[in-house]
Image (cartoon, rainbow, N blue to C red):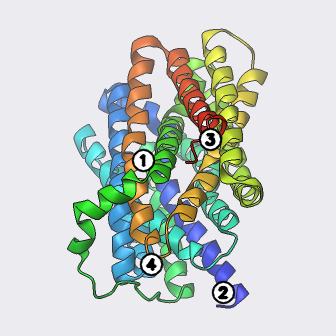
Amino acid sequence: MNWRYKHTALTLCTLAFTATMVARLVISPLIPEIRTEFGVTNATVGLGLSGMWLAYALAQFPSGVLGDRYGERAVILTAVGATAVASLFIALSPSIVAFVGFVVLLGAGAGLHYTVATTFLSRRFDDIGRAIGVHVAGGPAAGLAAPPLAAFVGSRYGWRAGIALGVAVAVPVFALFAWRVRPTEPRRPDQEVRERFAVGPLVELLSRPAVFYTTALSTMGAFTWQATASFLPSFLEFGTGLSAGLSALLFSLYFLVHGATQPVTGSISDRIGRDATVMATMAAGVVGYGLLAATAAADLGRVVPVVGVAVVGLAMSWGAPLQSRFMDLLSDAERGAGFGLVRTAYMVVGASGSVVVGAVSDATGWAPAFGLLAGVMALGLATLLANRLLGLGY
């Protein structure tokens, strides 16, 4: 495979990830309008978003299996196409029940992309951390543009038009990917899909100490990421008293830092090690969420939340080094379904971040809700330090 095509494929995989993320991230800035139209609470909308992320998580393992069976290109195209269709249905939702159902459908369709795209790239690049970092940056790139654009469109034309941005982005990306990326050979074309769901091998993989340890760390990161992606704009507006426009702008700042640091943390983890890099991101999470919680508890001005949001953006770049750690642990034959399995495992639990933080914010306020996220990051840092100081070898 020549250098040009390889990097074209990396770019298009990243754009496909961006498209699936845009469709999900345009929802968060529109939560106040959605709540008003349907007359529901933060916890209700958070339940729908948790359902979306749960469906996204559950799609990871089947995605890897389908990629091995039918080839990565076909699965990625299915994911982007399903994202466009689900976004259209969400924009047309007649009730909160339909809204929640279509949001869950969006999560399931978009969830087919990431695992197969990551394994596709890991088999073509030697510097896995950097390649994964570039790919992961597609999500923050979506977060940089989607929230303010959705807020603007929503304020002018209503939340349904803001949701429809997901359709507008996914359709051209689908066409471009279909045109420029060659069909990929399936790795296990003759193996029945049901054979890949045998319980024994799945339990064996997840129970390997190093895999279990990495999955636990990823679960903490995913819980925090989901909650942040769902409620950071609402937290900034209602928890700290910032305007809706400034809150959307800071949400974009979060994704700007998040996206810019993903390739950096991935590259650094290739050089100095995965765990040392993840420790730095978890420590940043303790500081960043701590600053945001303190701002919600007391009026600390506008500088502190800006700093807190930027540091949180750095903290959420844990994905590149931790996902590279999984690739280090899995053999080439295991990477498709294996990576999908661990992604499903840690994202299923992590999907609860939205509803937990939504419920805590309703019950006790925004400061305790984001203080909880600081605590989760502290637990992750303590786990990493214990492994290193005690020489556990995970």
Spatial CA distance of label 3 from label 4 is 38 Å
The residue that label 1 is drawn on is 346
Q: Which residue is mark 3?
A: 391
Q: Which residue is mark 4?
A: 72
Q: Residues within 10 Å of mark 3 (few under 14, many from 20)?
A: few
How would you rate the neighbour count of disc 4 (Cα within 10 Å): few for under 14, some for 14-19, many for 20 or more? many
Query: Helix or strand or loop: what does disc 1 sit on?
Result: helix
| Res 34 seen here | no
**Residue 324, image quadrant:** bottom right
User: Which badge, 4 or 1, is on the more N-terminal residue?
Assistant: 4
Rounded to the nearest angstrom, the CA distance separating label 2 from label 4 is: 16 Å
Left or right, 361 with respect to 252, comes to left
Residue type at mark 2 is Tyr
- Classed neighbour count for the residue bearing mark 1: other residues with Cα under 10 Å, few (<14), some (14–19), many (≥20): many
Instruction: Report whether 18 appears left or right of 279.
Output: left
Residue 5 - label: 2
Say whether residue 188 is visible: yes
In 3D space, how far apart are the residues under numbered discs 3 and 2 (Cα atoms)? Answer: 43 Å
Mark 2 and mark 4 residues within 8 Å of each other at the beta carbon: no
Amino acid under label 3? Gly
Q: Above or below — where is 34 with respect to 91? A: above
> Element under label 3?
loop
Q: Nearer the viewer, mark 3 or mark 1?
A: 3
Q: Quadrant of the N terminus?
A: bottom right
Residue closer to the observer: 201 or 299 = 201
Residue 394 placement (x, y as % from top left): 55, 48
Q: Position of residue 77 (x, y in %)?
A: 43, 75
Residue type at mark 4: give it. Answer: Glu
